[in-house]
């Protein structure tokens, strides 16, 4: 397709070596494969052909940029836990050592801190023995931390350890960091590729079908909702309140509500609600308790931030906005509200975030992580840099890091949220004044 | 996009009624939404714009064909069990009764047998009470059977019960049946819509991203492989042989091998292999046992059918080819081979098919089934007929039933199978003579 | 054994009817079966034969006191949730209706509130249909509440509904209540038997081998400890703090520490500890973090109550002491301590109580509950009253309700706690001053 | 208790060393602790005091026989897999190295084969690193085999490796082997203790409350029955037939039937049944299918052996009787029977044995295995030999190996089997001629 507008991926230079995978009769994807880039929410995306953009497919190239025998790989995991981190670490390590036969794979520890000398962290040398079974457990064997470090110090470290390809596994902040590292590398004109694997258990990356770990999280959340339902149903006016992950977007809460029919209210950041007033959440909750005697409420951690008077509580070390704790806030307000009305309720509060995110990946997420790790390695070996690998419309593709910007949110007018309204029977809005759009 | 080649969906006629969903501020998808139809294996799909075809998006329409208050819905489940059947039944029932307020939902029992008077099966009247918790269990509350029945008898039954929309949930044979029912309906010029929800735990429908229940099956298969690994590793020359579902395509075996690193050989229908000879499977198995002392072998039920001399064993009542049992065949041949060589092995055979397919759906599959059921109902209420609903590149779309034809198979040259070769370390082929392509 | 000192069980009178179980060739246990009553901690129990006491075995009697066709059974569940409640309800119902053919089984709702008219709770009539699958879910279909009600009102209700046998399923408070109901019944000289099934997820009933639901709880706690371990290991100086159930005794925490080798500190009510000082918990935690970089701490909810200055927070409606929240207290104190020392830690707090106790019973607990329910029914039908059924040295036996008094605690000098010390490597004591015993 | 008849345990000699556990303030159990030995089925056990026998409690002794610093421990696992094997290996290793500080722990591989030179198996040296996480997986890291080896060769090996305490983990055959090893040791007058940990997933050891792994197996079997129920209910005249473990006694089948209410027929070795005839199993199955349309049948592998005409199929390498495969036999006979009667059924056969026994131990079994391993070590260090450790009436005690002889079977007249009859509604017998007792 000659006039296809291909979204360009930065490269360190022309491939210089035959891939060692040639001997294994691997089919190669030499940039000719493309996938339509489709911004999911825009259903008029195809209004004209000129609007179409295409992404290059990930996969092994038959010509590569780095000489495997001299290549050193670095891996770092940053930010909060997410099911599948160990799967990705393992996949990169296996692809690097078994497929390409690289010289060395170094695991930097404690996130970006491990890339800065003053934390005194010797990187781990990873091999197929010491990573063989790591994916059977949650967490990350490389450990993690929040916050970024000085790019120049990081690049010093990469040079010190002669790293050729740095794989960063992390969220927004990490990927911004990866871009800054890339910029510093370019400034120094070094032959180091930076490949990002986006990580967000919240599933809020616009360009991806889904982020790894997300499905595992929904499975885990589903079980917690069952517990909340059991507690709520067993007591007079029982309320099971479950806080789930989802700072900027309510995907986990939404999928949980769709998959578990016991959810009666689903509160997400994308859909503001009032607490008080005739059409507020508390009035609807009261109505439900009167008629059905129990209620299960699922709230994403980023929901209802407008209910807090005060300023935002600042930012954490990774630069992420810190959120007010809507879970305990709701728990306390609900309790207070009904107490004031002498309406006895039985409140049970669930905050399972750590239990969910520290799980090992489900089989389906494991397979996804395997694909991500292998393709990150293929991209790096081909000399591609400043890019991400991820799944877009069922294919693993390459994105320039800066494209990650936009978050994927739940569209309050879209079919998914409409389905939540149908499944929960919650009112379409819980505001006393209509939103001015 | 004016010149978009939209794949047309048959319709009973122009919409005649306002949708009752209008009051709930539902966004409507009045056929204007489209999705690129992309045959997955063809990476040159975009060679020219004229090649592109588009599919209409599923979703509620604001004008509908049937008058809800007079509409009767029929549901039937056919063929083998699959995780999620009850989810789909429930979703159709809830959408029909709660969203549209239809007159009645009838569940025909025992597959197509329930649509034929001589089996004496009274259909069940489904409501939101008696289907509320059915998705928490595997199986199908409507029961099932194999085989088709006479279309004219079925349409007689539909007329007798005044059914307006028939939802058939089943595999290939069922969908061929649905098409025949549709043809008979058209011949009689009746106002009955036929909507299919494709069901195949094997995930072998070409036009779908994935079929419902498939991910649940992979999770279950993953656990069985762990058991096989435990057994194989615990004995001298231990062999854990696991037969998995997959008659025409090896998706479950493939995904299991990718997600569970304990698999050493993965045998699928798409990749023929020799048993004997210097490059045959048995030689490679022996080598593995000599070096590693144990082996885990996963075999899809349709693999290795070329190894049987005899004619195929006929067809079952649904018209599906009957397969020779490659599982017990391999078990016996492996045992015999090593016995003849006085090479002591410990063979442990696993045939977990029924355990896998009778599971309740995972949360992720539950959500998918919810979407399928609701959208099947939306399509039927809009008067669309002779169509399927399914997910294509992350969107739920409409397909004409006849499009289902082609099976999705694992491409032996594609990246997925290449990844399996990498993950298992099995040889790229186990044939003594190269295949003539 | 003629001189066996049998612990007597109160009875409404001599059996008057042949048991309907006679037709089913049931072996009967007509009080002749006995089990040694053995106070577990006292290993010198057998110092002389005269010390020995015996308990009568539970089981069906061939002569019974109540005429089945005229007998009405009442069931009530009280207090907190515990895995297996629905199993017990179902077992009583099935035994009553299917084995004895009683007239009616009534489930009083919301604990003792359902036995008092002013709460307007119509009892549910239970049958083998509506209880058939209830044990597949956690919680209690009869709902529950805390607190006791006036015995005279309760007995009025029993008379109103013509209840002959009341089965109370609950903890300490409930059993004290059952005894008071029994006293009121005796005062009025009524023919109503009161049979208790002791319920405590904490496993703290001295006379029982184990209480139902306890093993299920340990399985669930085990999983949470794995999550805490994953979080703790993934961050610099990671602390995974898990609060588990156990108000007066630390059995769940103890068994969890023995079954899950990731626990580094186990804090229980029976073993006091200092927070501060050279031999306090914080000093030992700091040492562990310095050497191993992470720590998993399990704390029973009744542990460390001596650390709170204030008076006890009163009693709940069931008369149970209310406890200070040692979980959040420790979380805050640990955080504060290390902050003051500029020692960066990563604290992850887990409070999974509701998730654990709302689970359905494991298979092993299900079987135990079946036995308890059936034997409660046998005891009641035989006219026995003011008694408990429970497992003592592997047999189901009868205890007089007043015997329940003493709690089973973890002996700090016994082998179980010694094993915890070995498994966790925590110091034998964390006190700055030796305890004066 | 002066006249207590204590069942004597053989000893290598008087203790000679202070236990290193003294420093850890361990309470010691210097043989003074006793437990009543109670043959479970005999409820008249207490007819006279003279009948009573007592067992010594397991536990650490303050004086020990072996000098820890010179002591070498050997461990061997034999026979079929059982959940918890790795837990026991780990517990012995940790107790030996961490508590006593022994010189070395050797894991002999592949069962008794590893104790005989001609198999060329170097024993593994076990430490707290390489056994730390083994219990998280099923199987046995020491691998296993069936069959015994020449005692004199084994004792040669023990002498060669200077083993002082041999811990054998295995079933009947293994324990007979352990006794023979012990006899050979005594003949040579060596200072080697032999300590057995009985292993049988079938739970058929008479003197034990329960064997390790048994509860885990019941949990797993419970899930399979649910699958069988799902399949059976989904088809006309659906039969779900599940073969479970249990060669000489039907405990797993029995507990599964009691814990899972979906079982309709439970067939065990202890209760013979006819296939044909008016009161045979097939007639009752047909009746059930006619009335309820589906049936779930659970059969222990040792059931119905009387139905096979031929001689028993010999013995396996461990000397165990080999059984005819009642599972496939029943599957085929049921199919044939109904085919002959032109009664269409849908047969689904489940043989989950390997899936069940290769599971990791549940938390409760893990705790039990920990206790067994520690106490085996304590007994060995104290110089006790030719003994078993196991739980008897809730305490860990010592038994002489020869006492293991009798199997624990399900008493057809006892309450447990009566409860099964009640739970399944199967007829009390399925014989055409009454059994002559």
Image (spheres, coloured by chain):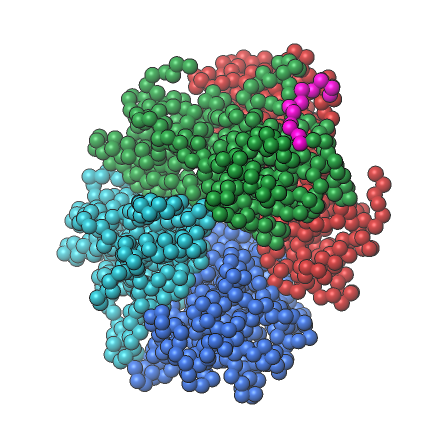
Chain colours: A blue, B cyan, C red, D green
The reply, left or right, for residue D276 in relation to residue C335 is left
The residue at the point 36 percent across, 75 percent down is: A29
Q: Is residue C123 visible?
A: no
Q: Residue furthest top?
A: C2
x and y, in percent, of residue C389 in the image = 60, 27
Q: Is residue B172 visible?
A: yes
x and y, in percent, of residue B333 in the image = 30, 47
Question: Can you tell which quarter of the image residue B38 is in?
Answer: bottom left
The reply, left or right, for residue A71 in relation to residue B365 is right
The reply, left or right, for residue A16 in relation to residue C357 is left
Along the viewing direction, whichever of B290 and B24 lies nearer the viewer: B290
User: Is C194 drawn above or below residue B407 in the view shown?
Assistant: above
x and y, in percent, of residue A70 in the image = 50, 77
Find the magenta span and give its range. D1-12
User: Is B140 drawn above or below residue A212 in the view shown?
Assistant: above
Q: How many labels sit on residues?
A: 0
In which quadrant will I find the C terminus of chain D? top left
The residue at the point 36 percent across, 66 percent down is: B418
x and y, in percent, of residue C54 in the image = 66, 20
In which quadrant will I find the N terminus of chain D? top right
The residue at the point 84 percent across, 45 percent down is: C434
Along the viewing direction, whichever of C280 and D90 lies nearer the viewer: D90
Residue D7: within the magenta? yes
* Main secondary structure of the magenta stretch: loop
The residue at the point 63 percent across, 80 percent down is: A153
Question: Can you tell which quarter of the image residue D282 is in?
Answer: top left
User: Is B276 drawn above or below residue B34 in the view shown?
Assistant: above
């Amino acid at each position: 397709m000659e006039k296809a507008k291909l979204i360009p991926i930065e490269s360190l230079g022309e491939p210089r070596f035959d891939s060692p995978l040639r001997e294994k009769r691997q089919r190669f994807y030499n940039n000719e494969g493309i996938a339509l880039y489709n911004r999911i929410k825009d259903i008029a995306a195809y209004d004209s052909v000129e609007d179409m953009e295409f992404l290059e497919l990930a996969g092994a190239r038959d010509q590569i940029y780095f000489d495997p025998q001299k290549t050193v790989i670095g891996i770092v995991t940053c930010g909060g836990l997410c099911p599948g981190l160990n799967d990705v670490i393992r996949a990169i390590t296996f692809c690097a050592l078994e497929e390409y036969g690289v010289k060395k794979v170094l695991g930097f520890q404690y996130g970006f801190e491990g890339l800065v000398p003053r934390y005194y962290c010797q990187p781990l040398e990873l091999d197929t023995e010491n990573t063989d079974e790591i994916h059977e457990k949650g967490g990350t064997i490389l450990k993690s931390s929040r916050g970024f470090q000085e790019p120049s110090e990081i690049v010093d470290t990469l040079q010190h350890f002669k790293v050729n390809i740095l794989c960063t596994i992390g969220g927004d902040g990490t990927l911004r960091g990866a871009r800054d590292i890339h910029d510093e590398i370019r400034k120094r004109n070094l032959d180091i590729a930076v490949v990002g694997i986006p990580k967000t258990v919240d599933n809020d990356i616009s360009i991806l079908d889904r982020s790894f770990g997300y499905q595992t999280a929904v499975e885990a959340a589903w079980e917690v909702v069952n517990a909340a339902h059991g507690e709520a149903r067993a007591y007079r006016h029982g309320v099971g309140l479950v806080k789930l992950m989802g700072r900027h977007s309510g995907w986990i809460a939404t999928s949980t509500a769709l998959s578990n029919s016991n959810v009666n209210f689903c509160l997400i950041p994308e859909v503001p609600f009032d607490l008080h007033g005739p059409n507020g959440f508390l009035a609807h909750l009261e109505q439900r308790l009167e008629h059905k005697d129990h209620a299960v409420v699922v709230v994403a951690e980023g929901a209802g931030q407008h209910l807090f008077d005060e300023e935002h509580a600042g930012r954490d070390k990774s630069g992420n906005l810190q959120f007010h704790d809507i879970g305990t806030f709701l728990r306390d307000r609900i309790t207070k509200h009904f107490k004031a009305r002498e309406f006895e309720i039985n409140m049970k509060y669930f905050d399972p975030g750590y239990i969910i995110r520290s799980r090992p990946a489900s089989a389906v997420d494991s397979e996804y992580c395997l694909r991500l790790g292998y393709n990150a390695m293929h991209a790096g070996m081909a000399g591609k840099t400043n890019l991400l690998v991820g799944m877009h419309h069922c294919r693993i593709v390459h994105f320039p890091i800066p494209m990650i910007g936009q978050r994927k949110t739940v569209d309050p007018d879209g079919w998914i949220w409409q389905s939540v309204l149908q499944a929960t029977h919650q009112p379409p809005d819980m505001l006393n004044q209509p939103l001015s759009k």
